[in-house]
Structures are given as C-alpha cells and as structure tokens.
Image (cartoon, rainbow, N blue to C red):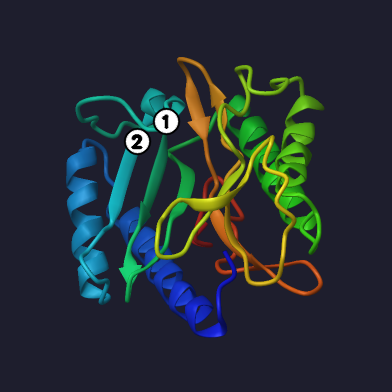
C-alpha cells in the first residue's frame, strides 16, 4: 500500500503519458467518429509514447452511454451536443495510470454545466480532506456530502454516485485500500488513489472526472492536474 519514491516516479510517468494521450484524442474528434476509432487511436498513441503494451484498458462513451459507469454494448457515433467520457490508462514498468476526462462535443446544456460543476467540487473536496491518519471511508463521505447538498443521492441512490470515490493503484490498477464506506484503513504517506466521484443521471448522461493523488506528510499531491473546464478540457477554448 505504501509506494517508494521510485514507484511514485514510475506512476507519475505513466499518468503524464495518459494525460497527453487524452489531449491528443480530443483533437481528433469529429462528428460521426466512432468509439472504436477513438479507442484505436488511444492505443496507438500510448504505444507511440512508450507505454509497456499500448492501452492497458480504454473506455470511450458518447452521449447517453456516459450514464453507464462501464459503458454500453456496441459502438456509438459522435454527435454534436454529446458528452464525451474517456477512461484509459497504460503501464510503465508495470505501474499503472488511469485517468478519465468528461467534456462536451459542441454546446453543453444548462444541466450538463450544473452536474459537471458539482462533480468538480466533489473531486476537489475529496482531495482537500486527505490527511495522514484520516480513515479512507471519510474521503468517500466528504465527496457524497457535496452531492447530497445538491439533492443527489443520498448514499448510493441515483441520480448520484453509484460507486466508490476512489481505489488504490500501483502494480494493479485497482488495489487496496479503497475510498469507500466501510474501509477504515488510515491514510498514510505513500498511499496512492484515484479520485473519481462519478455522477450518474440515469438514461441521460454521466460525468466522471478522474485523477490520482498520493498521500504526503501534510495532505495530498496530485499526479495530474484535474480538468478545469467542461468545454475546453485541455485549455484550448
């Protein structure tokens, strides 16, 4: 559960590579492009940047498919006004990345903006609550409290957050401990987690912002800077 400085460096490299792949993938999007086309591009981009085996996994979801945390069967074609949710990662010397970005292709609705902003605040609140000694489950509770204040949930009810706020990561993409109710493991420096309190609006859309942090002596440090904007996810407005 506790990563060494060398392990943290390998994870930082993997995550930096995947964030760059996300940026490149956003640049190829066009009306009618298929989810399969985007997945192929992402795998090739990971390989070009030196990942161990291309993409270790890749989920590309457009429109209503984004409301399903693990997507829908079959492929979708991108349309104007769709949300784009891409969750992907790679390995560097066995150490994993896992980053999700959700943004709009076209013009967002007012509800897209509202839910994206709540998701952003929940992710930030979870990060701010990290301190050595804090139980893992408390980070999950903090994220859910942001949603509950906006009449989402409560708990695991939908519309709201249907899964844990985060998971450990290292040589396995999902490893203990977990940021979830019932995991009372105290946070300690060197632990690494995803931070992804996804919001699902059933049959409409979902928004997941996922970045990873490691616990420090004083709090948390991001491996990758979180997404700042729904319409310009990589600062290209």
SS at circle 1? helix
Q: Which residue is mark 1?
A: 66
206 shown above or below 228: above
Q: Residues within 10 Å of mark 1 (few under 14, many from 20)?
A: many
78 shown above or below 236: above
Whether residue 33 appears in this view of the structure is no
Task: Give the percent coordinates (x, y) of residue 190.
Answer: 63, 71
Res 81 quadrant in image: top left
Residue drawn where x is 47% and y is 49% of the image: 101
Mark 2 to mark 1: distance in Å?
5 Å
Q: Which residue is mark 2?
A: 61
Residue drawn where x is 78% and y is 74% of the image: 217
Q: Nearer the viewer, residue 121 or 70?
A: 70
> Label for residue 127?
none
Residue drawn where x is 72% and y is 55% of the image: 127
Task: Give the percent coordinates (x, y) of residue 146.
Answer: 77, 35
Side of 112 where 57 appears, left or right: left
Q: Nearer the viewer, residue 143 or 31?
A: 143
Task: Give the percent coordinates (x, y) of residue 202.
Answer: 50, 16
Asked if labels 1 and 2 touch by Cβ distance under 8 angstroms, the answer is yes
């Amino acid at each position: 559960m506790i990563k060494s400085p060398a392990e943290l460096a390998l994870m930082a490299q993997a995550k930096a590579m995947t964030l760059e792949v996300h940026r490149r993938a956003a640049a190829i999007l066009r009306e009618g492009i298929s989810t399969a086309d985007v997945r192929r591009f992402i795998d090739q981009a990971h390989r070009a940047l030196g990942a161990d085996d291309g993409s270790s996994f890749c989920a590309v979801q457009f429109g209503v498919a984004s409301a399903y945390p693990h997507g829908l069967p079959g492929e979708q074609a991108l349309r104007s006004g769709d949300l784009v949710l891409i969750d992907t990662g790679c390995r560097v010397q066995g150490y994993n990345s896992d980053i999700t970005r959700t943004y709009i292709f076209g013009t967002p609705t007012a509800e897209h903006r509202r839910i994206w902003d709540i998701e952003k605040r929940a992710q930030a609140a979870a990060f701010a609550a990290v301190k050595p000694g804090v139980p893992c489950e408390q980070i999950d509770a903090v994220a859910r409290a942001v949603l509950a204040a906006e009449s989402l949930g409560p708990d695991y009810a939908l519309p709201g957050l249907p899964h844990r706020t985060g998971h450990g990561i290292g040589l396995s993409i999902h490893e203990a401990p977990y940021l979830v109710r019932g995991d009372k493991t105290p946070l300690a420096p060197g632990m690494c987690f995803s931070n992804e309190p996804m919001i699902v609006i059933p049959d409409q859309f979902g928004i997941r912002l996922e970045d990873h942090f490691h616990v420090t002596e004083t709090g948390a440090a991001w491996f990758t800077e979180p997404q700042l904007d729904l319409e310009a996810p990589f600062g290209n407005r």
